[in-house]
């Protein structure tokens, strides 16, 4: 489909962002700084609190600096000092301080919960004058022509926009409506992950992310919150895909209970806490690979277009860097939507190609099936802490740092 190239002043562009997560709010903030007041629709009734810890490193940290996010991040970042591995009796078998790999390992120098990072973005949006934010709303229909996009919402309202940005996650409705069914682009990575908030067990060492491997291809982690009274449970389950689990919370929790039943350590405590948690999350581990993130006047951002799964540790990085590039290109080519979206793909592709790479062994290496496999995995982990292997580890952990981040100086926050 061709696009009308007649010039439109930036301030007159009407842009819809579907999804009020980190990617959607980051692009809305940057557009606002360019004089473009986007409309953001979010299916949830209010901002989602909590969520798993996410980190900033390399290009994503540089984006956070340029966008002025760091003061807010510093106020709410987690005081995590490293990761340690626990056996079934609660004994520490391996301890890896964050500084071991210069803050680039499993625990980075800057860790913050997803909900807190999202609130930092929302606070800055409010400071900049706000956007048209609509909670409890989502897109149900999209029709484009050369000049714009007609959008139908769940509320029954219809509106016309110059551009639509789909930042609505792994199971993106925008992607399905414009590009095709999820199955065309998703690759199942062999299992599921669950995250939720729970009271901190007495055995949990403050400031340390504790991990425990359970026979049967299950991993259990407890990660400290900013509030010492609570922590985040992190559960990895390796196994065949089961479509019946989608949106069936009782079935999801029953699967977790079965896997934790003979796990030792704090497995029983976690299973019990899961019954009352306010923010239970469960989803498959999947990768989204697309030949293009752009079709006409619709562009995909973050997990909607290039999810790598939590296994990569780069989901937040891709959302932030993608939002920074997309907003920068739209602002720089406001009279030429086609060129702006083409440049977005061209500039971001090299970063995404590297960021989507899975760690060696993928989920299988993280969740051994047998006791022997668990012991072997820990032996390998111990070897990786030796000085002789540090150059190899640093190379693996710094893979995205060679990316040359473009500088959209007009959208850099005032110091």
Image (cartoon, helix red, strand yellow):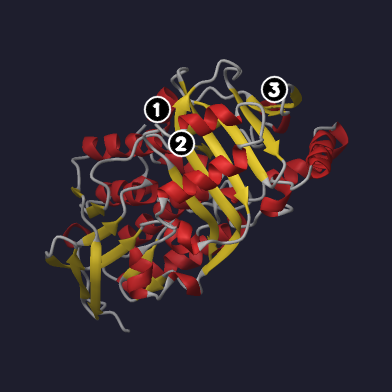
Q: Earlier in the sequence, mark 3 or mark 2?
A: 3
Along the viewing direction, whichever of 399 and 334 lies nearer the viewer: 399
Whole-number angstrom distance, CA of label 1 to CA of label 3: 37 Å
Q: Earlier in the sequence, mark 1 or mark 3?
A: 1
| Residue lying farthest to the top in this orientation | 202
Which residue is most to the left? 157
Instruction: Answer with mark 1 or mark 2, whichever residue precedes in sequence.
Output: 1
Secondary structure of residue under mark 3: loop
Frontmost of labels 1 and 3 is 3
Q: Which residue is mark 3?
A: 90
Q: Position of residue 4 (x, y in %)?
A: 25, 79
How many discs appear? 3
* Residue under pointer 1: 71
The residue labelled by disc 2 is 196
Q: Position of residue 59 (x, y in %)?
A: 54, 46
Q: Secondary structure at mark 1?
A: helix
Task: Sort mark 2 into few (<14), some (14-19) or many (20+) by Cα contacts within 10 Å.
Answer: many
From the viewer's perspective, tell me whether residue 188 is left or right of residue 115. right
* Front residue of this view, candidates 396 and 312: 312
């Amino acid at each position: 489909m061709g696009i009308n190239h007649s010039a439109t002043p930036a301030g007159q562009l009407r842009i819809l962002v579907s999804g009020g997560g980190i990617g959607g709010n980051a692009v809305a903030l940057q557009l606002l700084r360019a004089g473009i007041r986007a409309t953001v629709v979010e299916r949830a009734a209010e901002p989602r609190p909590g969520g798993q810890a996410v980190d900033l490193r390399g290009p994503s940290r540089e984006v956070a600096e340029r966008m002025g996010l760091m003061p807010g991040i510093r106020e709410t970042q987690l005081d995590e000092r490293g990761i340690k591995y626990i056996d079934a009796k609660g004994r520490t078998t391996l301890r890896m301080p964050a500084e071991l790999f210069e803050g680039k390992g499993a625990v980075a120098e800057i860790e913050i919960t997803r909900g807190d990072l999202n609130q930092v973005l929302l606070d800055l949006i409010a400071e900049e004058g706000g956007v048209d934010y609509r909670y409890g709303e989502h897109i149900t229909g999209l029709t484009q022509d050369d000049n714009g996009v007609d959008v139908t919402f769940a509320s029954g309202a219809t509106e016309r926009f110059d551009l639509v940005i789909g930042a609505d996650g792994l199971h993106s409705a925008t992607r399905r409506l414009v590009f095709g069914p999820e199955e065309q682009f998703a690759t199942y990575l062999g299992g599921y992950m669950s995250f939720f908030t729970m009271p901190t067990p007495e055995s949990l060492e403050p400031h340390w992310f504790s991990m425990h491997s359970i026979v049967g291809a299950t991993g259990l982690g407890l990660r400290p919150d900013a509030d010492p009274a609570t922590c985040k449970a992190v559960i990895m389950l390796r196994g065949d895909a089961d479509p019946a689990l989608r949106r069936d919370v009782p079935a999801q929790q029953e699967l977790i209970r079965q896997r934790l039943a003979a796990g030792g350590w704090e497995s029983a405590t976690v299973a019990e806490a899961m019954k009352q948690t306010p923010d239970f999350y469960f989803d498959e581990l999947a990768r989204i690979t697309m030949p293009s993130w752009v079709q006409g006047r619709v562009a995909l951002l973050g997990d909607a277009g290039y999810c790598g799964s939590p296994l990569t540790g780069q989901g937040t990085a891709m959302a932030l860097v993608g939002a920074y590039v997309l907003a920068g290109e739209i602002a720089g080519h406001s009279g030429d939507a086609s060129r702006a979206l083409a440049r977005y793909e061209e500039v971001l592709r090299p970063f995404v190609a590297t960021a989507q790479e899975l760690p060696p062994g993928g989920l299988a290496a993280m969740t051994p099936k047998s006791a022997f496999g668990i012991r072997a995995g820990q032996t390998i982990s111990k070897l990786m802490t030796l000085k002789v292997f540090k150059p190899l580890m640093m190379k693996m952990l710094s893979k995205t740092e060679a990316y040359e981040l473009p500088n959209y100086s007009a959208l850099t926050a005032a110091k």
